[in-house]
Image (cartoon, rainbow, N blue to C red):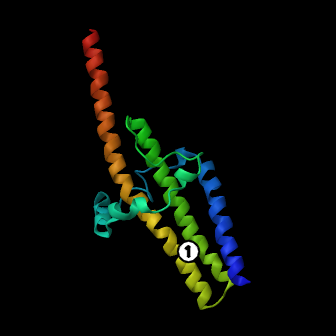
Amino acid sequence: MALLKSCLFVLVVGILSHYVGEALPRAWFHPDRFPFRAFAWEREGKIYDKLRIRDWKDQLPDMSRVMKDMIPKRVGTCPTAEKVMILVRETCVAELIHWLLALCGGVVYLFWKNSVGVLLSFLVFLGNLPFILIQRYNRPALLALAKRLAEREERKRNARTHSVR
């Protein structure tokens, strides 16, 4: 019975987390501030190359493919700095939600206050860790892309302004 309660808890919290994530105001999320900015030891996401995230990240489930109310996690064919920054903020939201889910896994221990509860809690944490790492891996590259796009857009605006004179 405790196993069933644990599984139901994880399922319900997982489903509710989608709605919580969608409801959070994006203005709260700043990729250049703690906890979302890249730490020095992450070397702008390059540390994750050692984990070969690029090789396996697309093999994991992506809720934006299932839930049509979510912003697709792809840059697209005609990206703008603004569109990429929307995606950057989405990585912040996803990271926060997966951290919360990982920590909620500790509640499973309340159902089974023994080694099984510890194991299940650890598995919930471990199940969310790859998604956290993916967000931290993607964010620096997306920020660099947004910066390049913003610079290009600025050059185009300046060129139009100078050609009008």
Mark 1 — residue? Answer: 124
Tag 1's secondary structure? helix
Q: Residue at position x 29%, y 16% from top?
A: 161
Looking at the image, which residue is at 41% across and 42% down?
84
Label 1: how many residues lie within 10 Å, few (<14), some (14-19) or many (20+)?
Answer: some
Q: Is residue 145 left or right of residue 112?
A: left
Three-letter residue code for mark 1: Val
Number of numbered tags placed on the structure image: 1
Residue 130 screen position, x and y as percent: 44, 67
User: Compared to 79, does 71 lie above or below?
Assistant: below
Front in this rendered view, residue 39 or 13: 13
- Residue 116 horizontal/vertical position (percent): 60, 88
The location of residue 102, given as percent across then percent down, is 55, 70
Residue extending furthest toward the top:
165
At which x and y percent is residue 41? 30, 66
Q: Is residue 10 visible?
A: yes
Name the residue at 25% across, 13% down.
163
Q: Is residue 41 visible?
A: no
Residue 11, quarter of the rendered image? bottom right
Which residue occupies 35% across, 47% down?
Answer: 143
Along the horizontal axis of the image, is 70 left or right of 15?
left
Q: Is residue 127 above or below residue 137?
A: below
In the image, farthest residue toward the right? 1
Q: Quick check: 22 above or below 150?
A: below
Q: Quadrant of residue 100?
A: bottom right
Work out which quarter of the rendered image holds the N terminus and state it.
bottom right
Residue 109 against residue 99 in the figure, above or below = below
Residue sitting at the far bottom:
114
In the rendered view of the protein, which quadrant contains the C terminus? top left
